[in-house]
Every structure is written in C-alpha cells, then in structure tokens.
Amino acid sequence: MASSREWASFISSVASGIYFLIIIFQVPLFRVTCSSGICRTPLQVTCSQLIASELFPAVVVKALLYPGAIANAFFKNKPIPSFNNLLKLYKFTNVKAAPATSDLQRIEVLAGSYLSIAGAIFGLLKPGRMSLFGTLLILWGLVREAIMRKSTSIDPARAIYMYPMMLIAVISAFLSIRKDVRKIVRSYRSKTNTKHSWTRLKAKQV
C-alpha cells in the first residue's frame, strides 16, 4: 500500500495538472467587465491589463492566449485562428487607447488572476499555495463587487457571474497543496484504522 506521502504527491500532481489546463485553455470561470469589454478567464483579465499598460510585448500576450484559442476553436468545430490575429479575435486591438480604470477598480480580480496564472505555471514544477490564493482572491473580488452592484441597475449581459467550473478550479487549487493533502490522507487513514480496530475488537468479544 502506498504511503501518505506518495498518495499526497500523486493527488497534488494531478490537481496541479487539472488547474493548469483550466487556466491555460481558458475554461470560463466567471464573467466580469474589463478593458476589452467582458472577460471570462484569469488569462483574459491579465492579458487585457498587459495590453492596456504595455508592460510586455504583444507577442508575449499572444503566446499566453494561443493555447486557449486553439482549444476553443476545437470544441466549437471552427478553424484554428491565426497567431497574428489573436488580439483582434479577443478584441484587444483598441485596449491600448482605453483607460485601465475598469481593471484597477476590481484590483482583487486582477491580482488574483496574476497569481492564478503564476500558480498554474509554477505548480507544474513545485505545487504550492499560489494557485489557491489567486483563486480565492478572485472569488472575494467577484463577491465584493456583486454586493456593491446589488443596489444599482445593471445590464444583465454585463453583470457579475460565476460559472460552475469555478468550483472545480477551487478544489483543484486546494488539492494541489501537497502538505494539506498529506494531512487529509493521514486523517482518513487514522479514522479507517480506528474503525477497523473497533470492528475487530467487537468481533473478538462476540
């Protein structure tokens, strides 16, 4: 039987891989307004801000977006988009002239998106808490803004929304933390062993 350390390492690696795929393939997790209009993934929020602030060359942003664009085209049975037309596809062409205030107003979502992407990439090498912190920060930002907007009338198409996949992202981010998973495995095994001991004791008494 595998040890708690081996089980924790296996579960953590699988969870980190799932989280990486969710982030890099741009599975919709939420809906929030951003510099480019509507963003549904941490990558879209981050890339929108990077284009607006011109912190990185456009080729870096395209490299981040391309895997998700290919996956989206595959699932929708559409032709694979051109690498050169990615900014136009994501409506990032006019973001440079647009103010970045819409992103800065929801700093938690922006910061959480940066942490989520960094955690997804570094988590493949050494799983840590960055993915979970980023995901929880996004959740807090969305909930806070939803509460603030509750009293105002907003176009339903631009309202804050969280997709069911957000739950999968939170769970996979949590399970990618090896130390916490090891504690869960040890606790489960301890309870199982205690239960078996009581069962054997009762059987002997009978």
Image (spheres, rainbow, N blue to C red):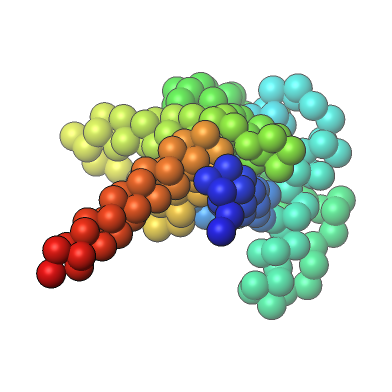
* Residue for point 59% across, 24% down: 99
Quick check: can you spot residue 44? Answer: no
* Residue for point 40% across, 50% down: 189
Q: Is residue 23 above or below residue 129?
A: below
Front one among 39 and 71: 71
Q: Is residue 16 left or right of residue 30?
A: right
Q: Position of residue 39 (x, y in %)?
A: 54, 45
**Image quadrant occupied by the C terminus:** bottom left
Q: Is residue 134 above or below residue 203?
A: above
The picture quadrant where one finds residue 79 is bottom right
Front one among 81 and 197: 197
**Image quadrant occupied by the N terminus:** bottom right
Q: Is residue 11 above or below residue 127?
A: below
- The tally of labels here is 0
Front one among 70 and 3: 3
Q: Position of residue 162 (x, y in %)?
A: 39, 49
Q: Position of residue 71 (x, y in %)?
A: 70, 64
Q: Is residue 111 left or right of residue 158?
A: right
The picture quadrant where one finds residue 63 is top right
Quick check: can you spot residue 56? Answer: yes
